[in-house]
Amino acid sequence: MTLPGPNSEQLSTAEEVAEEQIVDRIFEAVIEQRLPPGTKLSESALCEVFGVGRMRIRRSLLLLASREVVELHSNRGAFVARPTAEQAREVFEARQAIEPNVARMAAKRAAAEDIAALARHLELESQAHDSGNRRDAIRLSGQFHTMLAQIAGNGVMLRMIKELITRTSLIIGIYGAPGVTNCRDDDHAELIDALRKSDDRRAAEIMAEHLRHIEERVDLTARPGAGVDLVSVFGRRDA
Amino acid sequence: MTLPGPNSEQLSTAEEVAEEQIVDRIFEAVIEQRLPPGTKLSESALCEVFGVGRMRIRRSLLLLASREVVELHSNRGAFVARPTAEQAREVFEARQAIEPNVARMAAKRAAAEDIAALARHLELESQAHDSGNRRDAIRLSGQFHTMLAQIAGNGVMLRMIKELITRTSLIIGIYGAPGVTNCRDDDHAELIDALRKSDDRRAAEIMAEHLRHIEERVDLTARPGAGVDLVSVFGRRDA
DNA sequence: TTCAGCAGGATTGTTAACAATTCTGTCAAC
DNA sequence: GTTGACAGAATTGTTAACAATCCTGCTGAA
């Protein structure tokens, strides 16, 4: 299987693509931690930024909320989600359940050109990491995981993983030590090696270990109230 | 962990619950195959049925589309999704990747009351099956899988599984032999037995085998055009 | 000084009307 | 009899105005 474009979603209509574009751009901003957890996403601001009407923005925010990347509070607006410790645990658990299988599937299906693309991508990751370009490093390391899902050839799981990666960025933003990125290790290189050898079992093991590494870098027990929005904690008849 | 109510989603606002209710009811209708693939979901009809305004309906349809349970076609409306053979393959593959892990997690975490609830549920399934109550049988057998996810205690994966189960019903409706239900076998009973013994490894194996059974009952190669909507096949600049 | 109450402004939620496209039925032509 | 075009109806997509809620800053009293 060859690597398709940036993504291969299809919601058919011409207007939907614009909607999906907005959603994707916000996903990307969250992944790069340019939109920290709790950030207010006001409709008027988003209307100006993307140059679309309010309806389009509201639909995009609803889609983002259905992926639990933003939280909608009645009459208060949309905010970048702030996953609870419990939600963080669930996200990591889900990634542990899903992504090793994705790695296994990718190892079975990867063509030579797929592996070459991954290698090129890994080079970009290294460059971003070495040059201290934090945002690029985070984005690229996340993209590596989505590329695996694309190679695995399963659009359903690709969509799930995009959501989980984005939420992982939020989790690291809340519970991670400052400066910690998503994937610091060189596990990605080992994964490519396993794919090159079509060693699907090892690819799954590396991925599981890789995810454990990521999980180790967050402390879900600590700082329960760092930067908390007290209004939404003790707030109105909302939640 | 105790079994919570019908579902424990939280989108916070008071209006969202109404939205989620609409979505859930359509999900349920699709699962029970009361809404066959390709059915037109007109806004005005849904407004009357649920007694809400058009905006609420449009938002609900967007949420359903984001779960790929309905398809939105520009200026033509919303239709119950008709998964392609490729999509069907992806859904089964995703279930194979996810649900054995859910079964494993459930086996590790199931409390006595959870197992009792599953046993009671299985009894209902048997009754529905024996009395030839097809819709109840389908709905209950699907609910068994979501109950497992609830016992597993992972809301993220619960949501994924709800989507996959609903889409499976669509797939069976298209590619399955007439009269075939979702889960005919008695694998559910074996699963409960594995949970009772806290044998998480066996629970995962039974689930994998169970999913294979389901997959065997559909023929993705056959009848590519049974009841096809020619307009959406050769149709306008859409699709 | 601190806190409660209270406008004023801003933002979100909803409704209704309007615009645009598609579907349906009819009619004429071949 | 079938095919094509056309007009009217119906449905969807969009916009704008209105209503409701919330946030902010001020005033005044304890």
Image (cartoon, coloured by chain):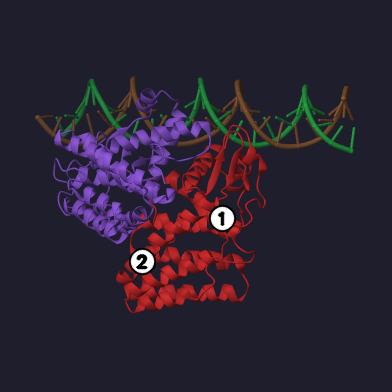
Chain colours: A red, B purple, C green, D brown
Q: Give coordinates of residue A182: x percent, y percent.
A: 54, 65
Quadrant of the rendering where the N terminus of chain A is positioned: bottom left
Q: Residue at x 56, y 76 (%)?
A: A127
The subunit carrying tag 1 is: A
Q: Earlier in the sequence, mark 1 or mark 2?
A: 1
Residue B152 seen in render: yes
Q: Nearer the viewer, residue A231 or A147?
A: A231
B2 lies above or below D27 = below
Q: Amino acid at mark 2?
A: Ile
The disc label shown at residue A30, or none: 1
Quarter-wise, where is residue A181 in the image? bottom right
The disc label shown at residue A151, or none: 2
Q: Give coordinates of residue A189: x percent, y percent.
A: 45, 77
Q: Amino acid at mark 1?
A: Val
Q: Nearer the viewer, residue B200 or D29?
A: B200
Give how far apart the Cα atoms at labels 1 and 2 are.
24 Å
Quarter-wise, where is residue B169 in the image? top left
Please tell me how crowded label 1 is: few (under 14), some (14-19), or many (20+) other residues with Cα within 10 Å: many
Q: Nearer the viewer, residue B152 or A230?
A: B152
Q: Secondary structure at mark 1?
A: helix
Q: Residue at x 32, y 56 (%)?
A: B198
The disc label shown at residue B195, or none: none
